[in-house]
Amino acid sequence: MRKSRVVSYLVILTCVVFVMSACSSRQLGYRYAEQLISWQVGRYVTLDSEQRTLLREELDSFLQWHAENEMPEYLLALHHIYRDANRSEITEDDLYHHAQMMGKFWLSARTALVQPSIRLLSTLTDDQVDELFSAIEERRQERREEARERTQEDIYEMRQDSMESQVRDFMGRPNRGQRELIGAWSRQLKSVGPMWTEYNDRWFEEFRAAMDARHDTERFAQRIEALWVEPEVLRNPEMDPILQANTEATMAMMVQLHGSMTDRQRQRLMRNIDGYRRDIMGMMRQRGALPQ
């Protein structure tokens, strides 16, 4: 998810991303998610006291729903991931199954955000909307400038460094053969950078048009729901086969990477997955959503 879209969600979904990625502070972050997200929102738009109250209420409701309805599903998915990760061999079908589950979780969260987002965004004044779009556009411009300065070699190196960092976090330092595998993968992927930019530009303009219609309740609700739940319809159709090919290349690389793990790496991976399971149970317990 590109940052401009996260911003336009008023960063409500940051709590989900934070929960699933923030190392040892996951449970602490979930406990203080409302304060953290409110602070993030304040970086983009200045809310009045009633809007801040509404944001806190919507966040509390979303987090409670998330803990009661989504986290049990996350926990079950992690049980299955733990089982498969502990096998000596996995298949691309195994990985596709888990990826599809993650996609369903993401769609479920996006759908749950539709009505809270409508209620929040419809309260923004013209000045607040201008402030929000100015902040978004400033960051979009920063990203465009960064992209213009990158060479193709820079892109390869960024992909490899990012993947090696993830591997290091989950199963420890990759060995030489694993680094070579990741390096070959980084050069195999096809770039969709310009099409991603075009896609995000379309989404941004559609969101701007939706905000212009925010006082037309029915029309505004329809446009926000479409943007939140089905943004992919704005993509260039030529992106889909490229993204599919990149996914297939990534799945193949991950199967090979899994098969190359040392016993020490496998043990660390299993500890990390088990740590995620304990963290999710702890976060459910914070919300009173863990069965006694």
Image (tube, helix red, strand yellow):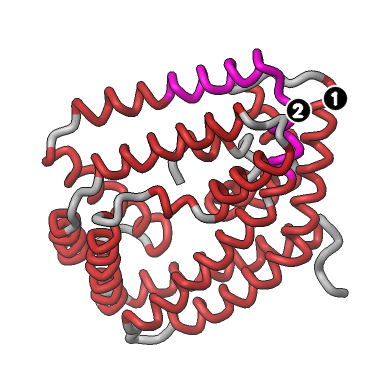
Residue 32 visible at all: yes
Which residue is pictured at 22% across the width and 67% down the height? 249
Which residue is pictured at 61% across the width and 30% down the height? 211
Query: Viewer-proximal residue, 245 or 251?
Result: 245
Which residue is pictured at 53% across the width and 35% down the height? 207
Mark 1 or 2: in front is 2
Whether the magenta-drawn stretch holds residue 228 is answered as no
Choose top left, top right, bottom left or bottom right for residue 172. bottom left
Query: Viewer-proximal residue, 265 or 137?
Result: 137
Which residue is pictured at 52% across the width and 72% down the height? 101
Q: Residues within 10 Å of mark 1 (few under 14, many from 20)?
A: few
At which x and y percent is residue 217?
74, 38
Q: Secondary structure at mark 1?
A: helix
Choose top left, top right, bottom left or bottom right for residue 59. top right
Seen from this angle, which residue lies furthest top? 127
Q: Main secondary structure of the magenta part?
A: helix
On screen, residue 22 above or below 278: above
Q: Which mark is residue 77?
A: none
Instruction: Give amino acid for label 1.
Output: Glu
- In the picture of the structure, the residue carrying the numbered disc 2 is 123
- In the picture of the structure, the residue carrying the numbered disc 1 is 50
Stretch in magenta: 116-139
Q: In which quadrant will I find the C terminus? A: bottom right
